[in-house]
Amino acid sequence: MTGLARTMLRLHRPALIVWGVFVAAALVCLVRLTEITAGAARAEAASCPAHQGFCGSMWATLDYSEPMGWVSTCVYYSFWAVAAWAGGALIGGELESGTARLAWTQGVSPARWLAAKLTVPALAIALGGALFIPVYRWAWSANRDLMGDDWTFADVFADRGPAVVAYGLCALAVGALTALVLRRSLPAMGVSVAVMVVLNQFLERHREDFWPAVTRTSTKAFEVSDSVWQVENGTVTRGHRVEGLDHTACHGSPGEIKRCLDAMGIDGYYAIYHPRSHFWPMNLVETGILLAVAALATVLAFRLLKRHTGAAAGHQELTV
């Protein structure tokens, strides 16, 4: 397997170099933003006249917040490129050109060929994630005053944990399976990306359901912290929760407000949310789902490859 892996490294060296440069650029950008740009942004904000709030709160931080957001987004959605590459160049291209079948006639079994094809990029994805995640967590936590504290953004949520690596590994497996099904590089590339986009949208939509949320109720109106992931809020009206019912229509003296609320049937208020302590269980659940999909796609890919190569070998024997 060592010789085969070395061959795969040579064959896909350009893609691995591009991946390495991409990860390195992201890390350098994060360090520069944290160590240099953040300090400059604060100094610029401090130099703004006190009456020019827009100067101090917006323009001075754009040089920091915008690049940080772009790094976060690009790394998160890099699984699109992984899926396209896996479906197109890694597997689909070699099946379409016949290079894979040539390798199988040179003493390399189809199973070993596919294993090497998946192992080398999987290690590269895992290594890139192992370097990126701790640096990103450090950079994201260092200057919350310049960007806010919203850990619920899709890219921030994934990049701060192993989910970002799981997306890459899942895209690799899905791309390989799609290529083996379609056996054409361009269709496999498009379908692989489409499958990962649908999967990603599904997981993002149901992310808040990955862990039981906290429910808070009170007889008085209250606001939850900006640092929580608010799922739902509203009023308790005649014993039933009513999401988003506007109770601010009641005005006047405390007595008048109480009579108005009683007339509306409002007994209390509630909020359903995820505190920041739920980040790790939610991220790990999403990671587990992605790795399960990746494992299933990998198993199906090996079975499909075995079926194709077995059928081809049987056809050749019958022909002879």
Image (cartoon, grey):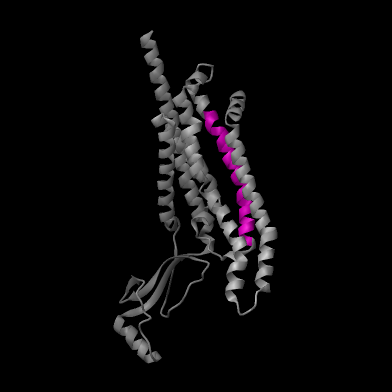
Residue at point 66% right, 65% down? 41
103, above or below 226, in the image: above
Percent from the top left, x then y, of residue 236? Answer: 35, 75
Percent from the top left, x then y, of residue 263? Answer: 29, 84
* Residue 162 seen by the camera: no
Left/right placement of residue 186 relative to residue 16 reads left
Q: Nearer the viewer, residue 298 or 120?
A: 120
Q: Quadrant of residue 243?
A: bottom left
Asked whether residue 282 is drawn in magenta, I would say: no
* Residue 315 seen by the camera: yes
Q: Nearer the viewer, residue 176 or 228?
A: 176
Which quarter of the image is occupied by the N terminus? top right
Percent from the top left, x then y, of residue 156? Answer: 54, 56
Residue at point 40% right, 47% down? 198
Residue at point 44% right, 54% down? 204
311, above or below 50, in the image: above
Q: Which secondary structure dominates the residues rendered in magenta?
A: helix
Segment colored magenta: 115-141
Residue at point 51% right, 53% down? 283
Which quarter of the image is occupied by the C terminus? top left
78, above or below 214, in the image: above
